[in-house]
Image (cartoon, rainbow, N blue to C red):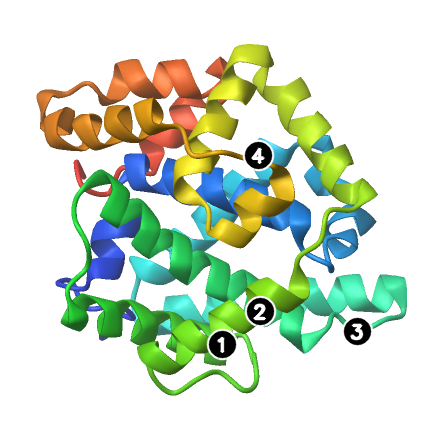
Amino acid sequence: MPEFVPKRSIVRTIWGDPDLILLIFAGSAAEFALNRAVDWLFFTGKLPRDPIGRLFSTVRYAQEIVFVDRETAHRTLDRINAAHSAVERQRVQTIPEWAFRDVLYMLIDYSERAYTLLHRPLSTAQQDDLYSIFRTIGEGLSIPELPETYADWQSDRGRHLERDLCYSRHTSLLFNQYRRHLGIWRYHLLLQVQSVLAPEEVRRLLHLRPNKLMLRLVQTYGTISPLNLQTVVHTLLIPPRYWAEIRRFDRVAA
């Protein structure tokens, strides 16, 4: 059975590296909280009860798409569609189409931002590859009106950032949960990472000023990460209950 994502794809490189995954979800944690449709994530109660675990479950779903054959990937996409439909039935409302695009766009953007921050900018071919794979995933999730090309997506991403983000009571509630589940110093470390990773509109709404020292630390770590410092860094960033989980995300070592 052909693989859903080719072995040489930059998407496999990014989504098989725990360091990059942590950066993606550090940024996503900020933007999730600002989205105008974030109330959908509060409806089931799963996100506020365990925001870190909820983000990690998204990684598991992503890896069950990226690192498997096409048939298995489409079964995972069908499970996600079924889960969304179940929530819509419970709430007797339909999740806005733009909200689905927001989440897909967010994962594309932070995939590129994380790789650029830790390693180097993506080449034009890698950008096209990244968008093409995620566009296929979006089509599998029945997300309509997806741009045809990476360049078109960039423009639409900008429009979504301007239109679909705001600071709300859900933003405050979610950041309080981040603080509660991470602890004080891990929470402040999260904010510093977000300050160098998130787009300008996200930083503005959260009053985050880029921390140049954090930027240098992350970039330096990217150059020395082959020295097997991952375990030490992950221990510092992630609460103990998630250490085993983050190790299972490592498809590079596997």
For the point 26% across and 59% down, which residue is it?
A: 11
Gap between marks 1 and 4 measured at Cα? 30 Å
Circle count: 4
Nearer the viewer's eye, disc 4 or disc 2?
A: 2
Q: Could you tell which of marks 1 and 4 lies nearer the N-terminus? A: 4
Q: Quadrant of residue 74?
A: bottom left
Q: Could you tell which of marks 3 and 2 lies nearer the N-terminus? A: 3
CA neighbours of label 3 inside 10 A, class few (<14), some (14 to 19), many (20+): few
Label 2: which residue?
Answer: 160
Identify the image quadrant of the C terminus: top left
Res. 247 mark: none
- 66 versus 6 height, above or below: above
Gap between marks 4 and 2 measured at Cα? 26 Å
* Cβ–Cβ under 8 Å for marks 2 and 1: yes
Q: Is residue 250 visible?
A: yes
At label 4, which amino acid type do we have? Gly
Q: Report the side of 146 relative to 130 (left or right).
A: right
Identify the image quadrant of the N terminus: bottom left
Label 4: which residue?
Answer: 53
Label 1: which residue?
Answer: 156
Label 3: which residue?
Answer: 94
